[in-house]
Image (cartoon, rainbow, N blue to C red):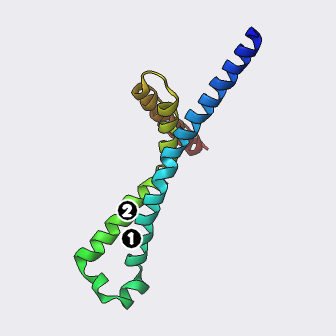
Amino acid sequence: MDNAAAKESRKTRFYAFMQNLGKSFMFPIATLSAMGILVGLGSAFTAPSMMDRLPFLQIHWVNIVFSFMNTVGSFGFTYLPAMFAMSLPFGLAKRNKGVGTIAAFAGYISLNLGINFMLQLQ
């Protein structure tokens, strides 16, 4: 009976870990929909063909607003790897979530800088 309880406990811990892992992956993925809408609207309304069809889009401040939407929306796609690198330790850490998140970001940046350095040597 004790062996069955230990087995059930392991199973419960495994399912809890998998649930936390899934939650950790969901934050960057959930932001992509909002970022995609911003990129889509910004790109569509700053396209030259659309500006020819709708002359009010050629007004300077209107064009700036849609260009800003495109720029802000592209953040999610540009920095998606960094968001994953930060969200996993934040979601999985039991204590010191901030320390784990900053360490993951520092590791990600160090990895990119190291790879860039090695590629420039070649």
Q: Residue 48: give x, y in percent of width and height.
A: 40, 83
Q: Residue 60: give x, y in percent of width and height.
A: 24, 78
Is 67 or 7 nearer to us in this picture? 7
Residue 93 vertical position relative to residue 85 in the rendered view, above or below: above
The answer, for residue 117, to whether it is visible in the render is no
Give the residue type that dot 2 points to.
Thr
Q: In which quarter of the image is residue 68?
A: bottom left
Is 24 or 81 nearer to us in this picture? 24
Secondary structure of the residue carrying numbered label 1:
helix
Q: Which residue lies furthest to the front in this view?
A: 1
The circle drawn on residue 42 is 1
> Pointer 1: residues within 10 angstroms few (<14), some, or many (20+)?
many
Is 106 or 73 nearer to us in this picture? 73
Q: Quadrant of residue 64?
A: bottom left
Residue 20 vertical position relative to residue 3 in the rendered view, above or below: below
Query: Of the residues under marks 1 and 2, which one precedes in the sequence?
Result: 1
Q: Residue 40: give x, y in percent of width and height.
A: 45, 69
Point 45% across, 52% down: residue: 31
Secondary structure of the residue carrying numbered label 2:
helix
The circle drawn on residue 71 is 2
Tell me if label 1 and label 2 are in contact, CB under 8 Å. yes
Q: Which residue lies furthest to the top in this view?
A: 2
Instruction: Give the Cα distance between marks 1 and 2.
Output: 8 Å
Residue 67 vertical position relative to residue 18 in the rendered view, above or below: below
- The C terminus sits in image quarter: top right
Q: Quadrant of residue 70?
A: bottom left
Give the residue type that dot 1 points to.
Gly
